[in-house]
Image (cartoon, grey):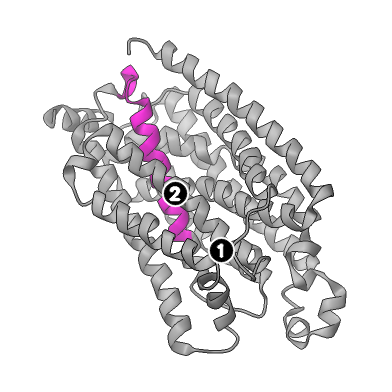
Amino acid sequence: MSAPTDLGARLRSIERGAWIAGLAGLAAGVVAAFVQPASFFPGYLYAYLFWSGLSLGALAVLMVHYQVGGSWGYMTRRILESATRVLPVLVVLFVPILFGLGRLYPWARPEEVRADRVLQHQAPYLNVGFFLVRSGIYFVTWLACAYFLNRWSTLEDRSGNPDLWTRRRRLSGAGLVLYALPTYFASVDWVMSTEPHSSSTICGLIVIASQALGAFALATAMTVFLSGDRALHGLATRQRLNDLGNLLLTAVMLWAYVSFSQYLILWSENLPREIPWVVSRTTTGWKALALGLVVLHFAVPFVLLLFRGVKTRGPWIAAVALGLLAMRLVDDFWRVIPAFKPGGFDIDWPYLVTPIGIGGVWIAVFLGALRRRPLVPPKDPTFHAVLEEALAHE
């Protein structure tokens, strides 16, 4: 592949297609909101959780890179930064969830609160006003971290000031806490409170692990896709792909560990308040989907990523990464939809158009941000060390 312009043309072409698919999906979603609102709002919620999770996971992984270093971060930084630049759009895409609060959350329905002592007890925390305030705080915190990391990265591209790297590293130390705490509470507000009679203290950790896994999978797949460009051709070596594969394997194991821990804790405690959440997702038609997650979200990628031959071959590691992204969407579907379909697995057409609508817009904005900047930071103070290491492993 000779020229970056070829890659730029491909990115623009994909971006245009993503805009068309996204706007068509959102238009179909508007129809679904009026025709079949009972399915649209849950479908929109799980789709939103998946796509917003990619941006938030990218923010976390970007800050981890600034804390620990590593040549893998040099290759993936523009991918991760571009994913965080979708966050302002995700604020706008959150609005339909606000219109559907009454359909998504029992605590947002006054008649149910009046008839339920548990909801009355939770009302000081789970109420519409406080929910809006908390969600606003979450977004402001995430956006502030993403804004400064991207701004200082852009200034570094222009000036080459090494102090800007130090600023990003210092921000990332506190930023990881500022990312984790809002994400933990947002998982309770947006996911667990669809079933306020159930509780899980580890739900937030599962969401954080899921977002990190999604971000690593996105970064891996995009690195392989972009490796034909001159900027990455000498950097995306077999050793660097192996590093990304190892990180992906670690994220898979972390997701499996926290997910199994949740199941083990709920099963061992055997409390009436917690059992329904597990039962509704591991019986009837949902049982097959749960087993599918065990096999395809953990077992298969875990085994494949043990082999260096898989991790060092671009098409193979990209296929594993794309498979994991698909299973991340299925996992979010499995976590959200059984709250509204406890009788068994069922697919309504709004469940299909909502991820296309949000996803099309997300991909278009992501690719637009990616193609407007150099694929590698041209004045990064660590560039020469990374380049020398890459050449040494060629």
| 31 lies above or below 177 | above
Image location (x, y in percent) of residue 235: 25, 28
Dot placed on the residue nearer the N-terminal end, 2 or 1: 2
Front residue of 389 and 307: 307
> Residue sitting at 32 percent across and 13 percent down?
1
Q: Is residue 107 left or right of residue 91?
A: right
**Residue tagged 1:** 335
Give neighbour class at mark 2: few <14, some 14-19, many 20+ (Cα, 10 Å): many
> Residue sitting at 62 percent across and 50 percent down?
48
Identify which amino acid the numbered label 2 is placed on. Gly
Q: Look at the image and say whether residue 376 sits in the magenta stretch.
A: no
| 52 lies above or below 200 | above
Span of residues in magenta = 208-232
| 217 lies above or below 282 | above
Circle 2 SS class: helix
Give neighbour class at mark 1: few <14, some 14-19, many 20+ (Cα, 10 Å): some
> Residue sitting at 75 percent across and 49 percent down?
95
Image location (x, y in percent) of residue 317: 29, 39
User: Would residue 107 be visible to someone looking at this image?
Assistant: yes
Image location (x, y in percent) of residue 79: 44, 35
**Residue tagged 2:** 214
Location of the C terminus by quadrant is: top left
Q: Is residue 326 left or right of residue 344?
A: left
| CB within 8 Å, label 2 to label 1 | no
Mark 2 vs mark 1, CA separation in Å: 16 Å
Front residue of 210 and 77: 210
